[in-house]
Amino acid sequence: MTDEKMKNGTIEFSNSRYIQDGKGEDNNINKLTSHDDLNKLENNNKEDYKPHEHRILQHPNSYVGALIHIVKGSLGIGILSVPRAFKTAGLLMGTLGTIFVGILCTYTIHLLVRASHKICKRTRTPSLGFSETIEVVFRNGPKCIRGWASFAKIFVEVALSLTYYLSNAVYILLISESLTKLVSFYHPLDESWPLYFKLICLVILSFLCQIRELKHLVPFSLIANMTLAVTFGITLYYMIATLKETDTSDRSLFTGLESVPSFLSTVLFSIEGIGTIMPVENSMTEDKFLGPVGVLNVSMFLVVGLYTAMGFFGYLAFGSDTKAAITQNLPDEGIPAQVVQSCISIAMFFTFMLVFYVPTEILWKHIGPKIQPKYQNLAQVILRISTVAFVILVASVAGHNMDSLIDLTGAVFFSILGLLVPASTDLLVNWNDWGKWNYILWKNVLLFIAFVFSIVSGTTVAIQKIIR
């Protein structure tokens, strides 16, 4: 799940660079050279160097395995929140908008992966993670921005970490809302109960999030996947049953331009999964990730299709009553509905642990080396408890505004990671050749405009909802 550490890369020495070969072999490029000589060597060798062939992986991912990873990583709370986006925008706008955002996200992921491949060829590196790709692109870009390489890497890591932590805050909100809905059928509750459920999560997760090895989280991942499957199946059953008994003639096709910012933020939150792309691509030894029927296109086609169908039929079934998560629309009575509330709570609880692993590893990578070995275990414990407490605090402050927190996360962090960063990377990696009529420059200008619109309008609408 985490990006691989960059073991091979570019080390700068004033006016010269040292390029390490992906295999660590001695060859004519593994020596100190001037920029001009290096550029000649790169031009001669970059087409011959194929990063995938130099990846030494104990368990490489196949085409099918990589496709399953991306599809599975996209099927979480995001798909449960898409019906609310359709309620915001209307059936027609929701359908066309979801497809458009899906195509846009797929395209920007293409930009990032292609940029990573290009910079890997130039530096003769087998693979680079998300933040490492940005760092090396900056370090090998125009002279005026090379000094910003470390900042660019940290910027991406901070954005990734906050995205994961805020997503976990959404999970906590869904857990507390689901448990409240479940328990309230059997026992009268007051407004403080959701807070009690959050505190219970704080205590339990403070212990469970001390698990530090990814392989030990596999059983929890299996449970989360199984309970999510049950949730989707029963929710689909209720949606179909509701459609049979409901007059859907009053469903809106388009609610107006003022609904666009909230809709875009929600769909970006739901579909965008750029943080998990590079680890999956780096786990492949075959060059089958891109291309017309590559892993990325096929998986995103499936994901966008599923999200569009869930959003369309979810809003069609529940109309203006559609909640932030479609599971909240299920009735309180009935064993299947109560099973859904239990399953979604379990799934989000264990998904929290999996998502929590990524940003915590990023933080520890920076904090760990600065701490004496004898205190490192204690420091890890404190770090993990503190970050769990931070996430619970955010969820508590958000209160019942799960939809606003989803919009805010999508508007800010998924716009940064899904629009700004890929556009910047594509612009810099092609700095010396922007193509005919500088089309690479102009298309990225359009992406920058889309980023500004998304972050400004989406954040404004989300904050207005929170303070009402």
Image (cartoon, rainbow, N blue to C red):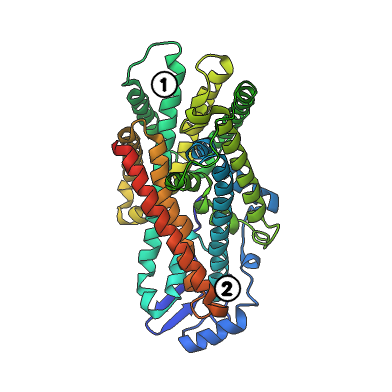
Mark 1 Cα shell of 10 Å, populated few (<14), some (14-19), many (≥20): many
The residue at which mark 2 appears reads as 121
Residue ID at (39%, 53%) = 455
Between 362 and 423, the one nearer to me in the picture: 423
- Quarter of image, res 211: top left
* Above or below for 75 versus 278: above
* Above or below for 459 versus 320: below
Q: Nearer the viewer, mark 1 or mark 2?
A: 1
The location of residue 121, given as percent across then percent down, is 58, 73
Which type of secondary structure does the marked residue at label 2 adopt? helix
Residue ID at (59%, 70%) = 23
The location of residue 373, given as percent across then percent down, is 33, 51
The residue at which mark 1 appears reads as 180
Q: Determine which of the numbered discs, if any, sits on residue 286 in the image.
A: none
Question: Image check: 435 left or right of 183?
Answer: right
Q: Earlier in the sequence, mark 1 or mark 2?
A: 2
Question: Image check: 123 left or right of 169?
Answer: right
Query: What amino acid is labelled 1 in the image?
Result: Thr
